[in-house]
Amino acid sequence: MTPNARFQEFIKDITPSPTTMANSKSAHESVRMALKADKEFKDKFKRVFIGGSYKRSTAIRPRTKQGSTERPDVDLYVVVDGHPWFADPEEWIDDLYDALNRARKDLGITKIKRNRCSIALSMNKADVDVSILLERRSDGLYRIGNRTTGEWYKTDPEEHTEWSAAENKRFSGRFNAMVRMVKWARRENKTVSRHPKSFQLEMFVAPDMDMSETHYGQLFHDWCDAFVDRFKSNRDSENCPRIEDPAVPGADILAGVSDEAFCVYYDKIKKHRDDARKALDADNQDKAITYWRRIFGDRFPKPKTASGGTKRSATRMSPLSFKSAQAAPISRPAKFA
């Protein structure tokens, strides 16, 4: 079996670096300060808080394309007073857009865009999604506005954060690591519209994650196996399952995932299960790593040599060999990929 240390190295590698976290912190704090300083908007909101995978500690390291690292993503929520019957989501989002646009130069914003429920900012150090929330109503929930439909939807990003933290505690700190592995596998193996993603994946992981298993390779395989069993009937009937939002009673956390996207994801998890089984049963580590890399890509570390480095093939000429003799392969340390 692949040593658990290889998985721990992998998890550490796909976790956002201290620099990435510092850049994210700098970006969202700058936006917060800019809104508080804006003369026209500062009295219109009550508070600002962060959410998303950055806050839940389940984010994975940003992508690297053509040698360039993409900026991390941060979700920011601006809480305002208002009643969903009378408040206009488009007006609120436009007001937020204007305030952020006024601070465009100071914030280092290279691109600003209105989305359906947020303002998307591309900044020097991070990408920030800023959303308007109506203050909690009598049901204890926030409302997030959709400027396209004019509706306010029930939500609670803070409860999602608390739920995720509770799951991580329940699994003795392994939940966040497992979620990162599942997220990375989805990134490495393309799905329809990149779905399911973020909190949806966390909701998939929690019910079927083994509480007692500590080896991450076995843990990943067993979760895949349980996922395939749980949702087989949905795959057979080609429809996306329904999973209740832990923060909003009656709401479906998978509402934005199409039947096609779920079926594609299901098939990939089934393939991951089979490859993970082959890796766990492999009679040597080179073969096992080949299967793990089918799931997690080339960032999954190679086996260690006796000297502590990663293993690779090289050639050399024995001093007792004839010049025409074929060089024999040996193992030498190499840098970690």
Image (cartoon, grey):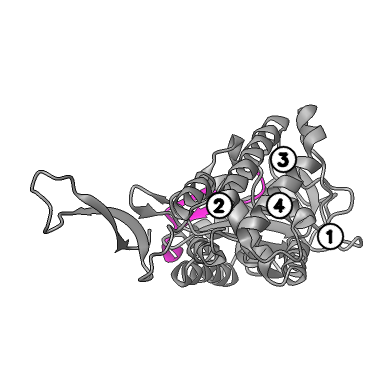
Quadrant where the image shows the N terminus:
bottom right
Q: Which residues are magenta?
A: 105-122
Residue 229 is left or right of residue 97, and the answer is: right
The residue tagged with tag 2: helix, strand or loop?
Answer: helix
**Mark 1 and mark 4: span between their CA atoms?**
35 Å
Of badges 3 and 1, nearer the viewer stands 3
- Which residue is tagged 4? 222
Question: Which amino acid does the dot numbered 1 rest on?
Answer: Leu
**Mark 4 and mark 2: span between their CA atoms?**
17 Å
Tag on residue 184?
A: 2
Residue 234 is left or right of residue 324, and the answer is: right
Tag on residue 239?
A: none
Q: Of the residues under marks 3 and 2, which one precedes in the sequence?
A: 2
Residue 98 on image: x %, y %: 56, 55
Q: Of the residues under marks 1 and 4, which one precedes in the sequence?
A: 1
Of badges 4 and 2, nearer the viewer stands 4
The residue tagged with tag 3: helix, strand or loop?
Answer: loop
- Which residue is tagged 1? 141
Front residue of 44 and 301: 301
164 shown above or below 150: below
